[in-house]
Every structure is written in structure tokens, then in C-alpha cells.
Amino acid sequence: MATSLISQHPSTSGLQIALHPLALLTVSDYITRHTLRQGRGPIVGALLGRQTGREISIEHAYEIMISPDLEVDTQWFETKLQLFKETHPSSDLIGWFTITFSPTFAPEDNHVEIHQALLPWNESPLLLLLNPSSISGGGKLPVAVYESIYEAPNADGDKNLVLRFVPLPFTIESGEAEMIGMDSVAKGASSATAATGEGKGKEPATSAATQSTTDLGPAHDELLSNLTAKKNAIQMLNSRIKLLLAYLQSPPEGGENNHQILREIKSLTHARLPLLRPARTEAFKIEKLAEEGDVDLVVLLGAVTRCIEDVRSVGRKSAGMSQVFTTGKKGLMSFGDEGLEYGPPPRRGPRGVGLFGF
């Protein structure tokens, strides 16, 4: 049973766990993407941080490629871990995370297999369980943290030790950069909530073009600002890469190469730029082509719709003019959205002014 995996003895290690919001956001983002994409296999990831004596801070997290048979892809895991260590030299593997739907946050039997598979990188990794279906009040996070110990299964003197989990208390600790990021996320969520709550009262009717250009709402403004910031960041990254490439292709003439700059370029290209590459290149290409096709299809449908509307307008006007000149009908002609409309014939003035002014 899953409840038997929790030790009946309290923790005696004295570990103090500090959980950072960045790690929680990464875990929740991975769970959301895995659910929306209908991914197969369990949701498992690694936790990175720092340990100073009995104080452990969980600062980063990333997903782990694992098969439905609970086999960890060791080559991919070691490559990813090495990249994170090069980017964050002071961080190390602290533990791993997964989800549970137990209201008591109790570890399960399959968690033991994954836990033992990660022992070569950490002899006593922590376990973080998140329950995405739990709704807890009072601001309590649906998260539980465990440490692993080995103890005898009973008090009969059995020397065969088994793996057990001991719950640990934890606190939320955030740095200055994380506080700024959390404030931005909170503002975006509040803007989206305010946008969904509008529109219940009566408002004056406006044209679609005016509404789409002038009344976007706070949620759209937030999205536009985020996309603009990402665009500027990508353009700046592209310009910096072109600058480095130009320096390497045409070094300074009449002088020796600056080895300090070359070492910095090498550390940048070998440590940080590989993080921008997707883990699954083929799947990324397929998803990228699908999104490009959807965007092109929407643009094409919009162009076809505008062309059809223009053709219908020209057809209505052409039919109306043709009917006037062929039948000689003296009605007042107007071209509205519903087609050709006729009104009562105009009154003749004292000088015999007709429909066309003579």
C-alpha cells in the first residue's frame, strides 16, 4: 500500500527546505504542457539547488525523459544535468518531482523505482509531490516534500532495510528577481480576470474595425507587451551573435588574437546556447510546421473572405445599374448592405428636373 511507504518516525535530520517560486512555476508549466499535449508516460522531473549544511534551497527544475516502464534515459539526463551545472555552477541535483492524486500526498510504489534510478547522482534525493487536483484553502500549496531513509520494516529484528519517506516542512523563499517575475505573473492573471468579467452591461454599438484597433482590453495589452519584449530580446540576441560571427570571420589586422575574448566566446557558445535548442528536434520541427500552417491558413482565409465580400459588393452594384439602364425604372436607387433598394420616385420641380438632373 502507498501509505506504508511513509515512515512512522519523525525526521531527525534537521533539514530546512527553502522552495523557490521559479522551481514551482517550472513544475506547474511542465504539468500543464504535458496535459494539454496529451503526453504519454509519467510526469517526472529533476530538482536543482544548493545545500549548505542542513539548509537546502530548491531553485531550478527541469523535466526528465522517462519511458512508460519507468526507465530513465540516462544519457539525456546526464547531458541536461551537465548543461545546467555549466549555467549554474553552484547548483547540484537535490531531488526530483512528480505528481500525485492522493489527498494525503502519500508516495506510491512506482515512486520507489524512479527514486532508486536516481541514486547514482544523489545518494539521498528529496521527493516533491504536487497534487494538481487538490484545492486547498488558506493559501496552502498542494505540495509535499519528503526525504528518503532506510529502516527496518518492523520491530522484529529484521535486518533487511527498506526505503521509506519522511515528510519535511518547507518554506517559500524568493529573491529579488523572482519577486519581480511573480509580480508580473500576478498582474497578467489579474488583467485576464478583469477582461473576462467585462461586457455584462449595455454598451454603445461600435464598428468591428474601431473595436479591434482601439478597445483591445488589458489582457490584450499585456499579451502585446510580452510579445514585443520577446521580439526585442530575440532581435538583440541575433545582433549579438552576428557581431561575434563577424569578429571571428575577420579578426583585427596586424595584431594577435585576444585569447580572453575567444575563451569567453567559447564558454558562451558551448554552455548557454545549447540550452536554446529543443530537447526533441524532430517533434519541435513538426510542431513548428503545424503552427506555421495554421497561421498561413488563417491569413489565407481572411484574404479569401475579403475578396468574396468585394466581389459581392461589385456584383450588387453592377446588377442594380444594369437593371436601371435596361428597364428604365425611375425609382430612387441606393446600395446598402442588403443589396439594391428602391424608394418612391422623386418629385419633379417646376423646370422638369428628373432623376439624373435633366
Image (cartoon, rainbow, N blue to C red):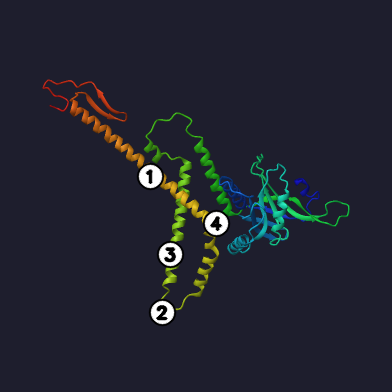
Front position in the image: 101 or 20: 101
Which of discs 4 and 2 lies nearer the camera? The answer is 4
Say few, some or many: other residues with alpha carbon within 10 Å of mark 4 (under 14 / 14 to 19 / 20 or more). few
**Residue beneath label 2, please?**
254
Spatial separation of the CA atoms under disc 4 and disc 1: 30 Å
Q: Nearer the viewer, mark 3 or mark 1?
A: 1
Residue at horizontal 73 percent and vertical 46 percent from the top: 106
**Cα gap from disc 4 to disc 2, whole angstroms:** 45 Å
Q: Which residue is mark 3?
A: 242
Q: Position of residue 333 (x, y in %)?
A: 23, 27
- Toward which corner of the image does residue 101 lie, by quadrant? top right
Q: Which residue is mark 4?
A: 280
Density class for disc 2 (Cα within 10 Å; few <14, some 14-19, many ≥20) is few
Q: CA distance from mark 3 to mark 1?
A: 34 Å
Mark 4, secondary structure of its residue: loop
Q: Assess disc 1: are there few (<14), some (14-19) or many (≥20) residues with their C-alpha within 10 Å of its C-alpha.
A: few
Residue in view at x 51 percent, y 73 percent: 260
Vertical arrangement, residue 215 with respect to residue 238, above or below: above
Determine whether the residue tagged by mark 3 lies in a helix, strand or loop. helix
